[in-house]
Image (spheres, rainbow, N blue to C red):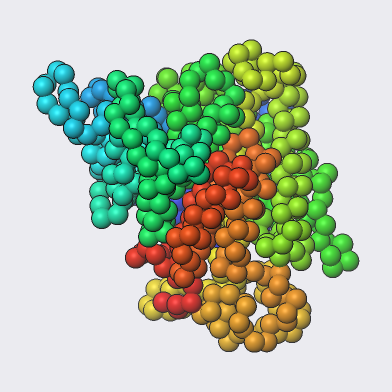
Amino acid sequence: MKFSENAIKVLERRYLSKDEEGNLIETVEGLFRRVANHIAEADKHYDSNSDTKALAEEFFEMMTNLEFMPNSPTLMNAGKPLGQLSACFVLPVPDSMDGIFDAVKNAALIHKSGGGTGFSFSRIRPAGSSVRSTGGVASGPISFMKVFNAATEAVKQGGTRRGANMGILRVDHPNITEFIQCKKDSAEITNFNISVGITEKFMEAVKADTYYDLIDPKTKEVVGQKRAKEVYDLIVDMAWNNGEPGIVFLDRLNRDNVVPSQGEIESTNPCGEQPLLPYESCNLGSINLNAVLDEEEGKFVINYAKLARIVDSAVHFLDNVIDMNKYPLEEIEKTTKSTRKIGLGVMGFADLLFKLGIPYNSEEAIAVAGKIMEFIETRGREASRELAKTRGPFPLFGESIFKDEEPIRNATVTTIAPTGTISIICGASGGVEPLFAISFIRNVMDNDELLEVHDYFRKVAEERGFYSDELMREIAQKGSLAHVEGVPEDVKRVFVTAHDISPEYHIRMQAAFQEFTDNAVSKTVNFPNSATREDVSDVYRLAYELGCKGVTIYRDGSRDLQVLNVGKVK
Ligand code: UDP
């Protein structure tokens, strides 16, 4: 099998089944057989005579050839008693004690199973307003977020992976300024990513520099006004400071809401790529773009026939996951099965560009992104329509925005996930992000240092005769090839990393993928430490103009604990 040493380590630590004493009772092959067999089983629901053995083999091959990987919960739980297979959930948080604590409980159950939860806190009445039953005073959305946070913290120890949350507050909620600053000094909201839910109205008010209304979600009354630009500048300032809050364009999420009759989309999953209705869940899967490259006479070309084959099989796989999933709540099962959303995306995009010899920060790369994603989206929808012929369209198709088109099995087909862990399993670069470093030094036990170099870069460096451990160390220290002597100019141009790429190109790449993605794109826009607030603001505006559904930024060095420090060998 093709798994790297690193991949096997991750699989052993977190994915392979263990007995009560923690001993492995499953092999890597066993894991993929378990997943493939279980997911193939769903075909029996539609045709009791179907050859699920052959299908299981197809799925097994697709995963172990590193062509496609489903999200982590599917790998961890398929065919096991827990059986929860989705990465993404959105839960409603109503304005009542019962409702809020139901959501806390439901989130805990989801976290235990490896899923992440998103919430909008916008329905909670503002701090200071009255509580009729007790004659008391409401504590407001931010204080309740701390309760969710504490519950997440407690489940962490028992769960299979860290519970992650998204918290969203509408920009017209009366507590918006408190929300924007809520992660500034608080250690009580660490298990949340936060995003401000921006409306078109608000953006227009920023542009015109006018005031906008704050609305009490309970009474629906206008309870105040704020100068839009002041709130916008506060968001920018905080994001510049430490990367949060992000922003999400609510009207855009709802423009793509396939079944508006089911209510509004208020939130996304934790990493922002999957907008969902309350009680909806979605399972993701990603195609490894390294696997669709053929090498012909030393040159790489995209094999579209192979890509088509993988898309077809992946859509089949993800649709089956919906049937085989064990849902944490009946309500979630009902909502999820009524739209049957799936999220097929890609990983290894940065690797693909290296191999094609195209710099990430170039017009050509933007064009390649659009071409690949358009192909996947078009083909993915065709595959979903094909499934609808035998399995029927998703149950709410008749009241969906597609009702006059050819029936389709899944209300959404495409999502670009971060692929945080599955990209390690596949030895691919994450999602559609550029590489963070070409080489870096990993601290291992006993203060040993391990030099890690990007596989393909190493190959090129060796072939071109400029490889040395010393040079790779220098690259690790500097964090980029740009100022390293001894690397040929054409190589420097192609092997760019996150900090070589201007924020504008980061956003343009996100927009290029978004254009052909039903759901949203997980992407972080990296800024150098020297970036100004104005730079951040410019990127927000550009994202808005280019049709992105949200933005997450990070200015280098702005958070105390940075996972990977470019330029510092620790
Ligand atoms: N997620 C989570 N906890 C984690 C990592 C991810 O709940 O520690 C959820 C979250 O909803 C995120 C989604 O899984 O948006 C997809 O993340 P990613 O692609 O990184 O997951 P992978 O399948 O690679 O583990």
Q: Which of the pair 103/532 is nearer the observer?
A: 532
Residue that sits furthest to the right in the current view? 297
At a point 29% along the width and 29% down the height, the residue shown is: 223
Q: Give how far across and how far down residue 330 sits, in percent.
A: 42, 19
Q: Give how far across and how far down residue 540 sits, in percent.
A: 52, 50
Tell me: residue 66, above or below residue 382: below
Q: How many marks?
A: 0
At a point 76% along the width and 66% down the height, the residue shown is: 357
Q: Which of the pair 333/522 is nearer the observer?
A: 522
Residue that sits furthest to the left in the current view? 135
Q: Give how far across and how far down residue 271 sits, in percent.
A: 48, 45
- Quadrant placement of the C terminus: bottom left
Tell me: residue 8, above or below residue 127: below
- Quadrant placement of the N terminus: bottom right
Residue 295 in view here:
yes
Q: Which of the pair 535/300 is nearer the observer?
A: 535
At a point 18% along the width and 32% down the height, the residue shown is: 128
Tell me: residue 99, above or below residue 224: above
Q: Is residue 162 left or right of residue 258?
A: left
Displayed quadrant of residue 237: bottom left
Q: Is residue 43 left or right of residue 202?
A: right
Displayed quadrant of residue 545: top right
Residue 50 in view here:
no
Q: Give how far across and how far down residue 403 sits, in percent.
A: 68, 16
At a point 76% along the width and 58% down the height, the residue shown is: 364
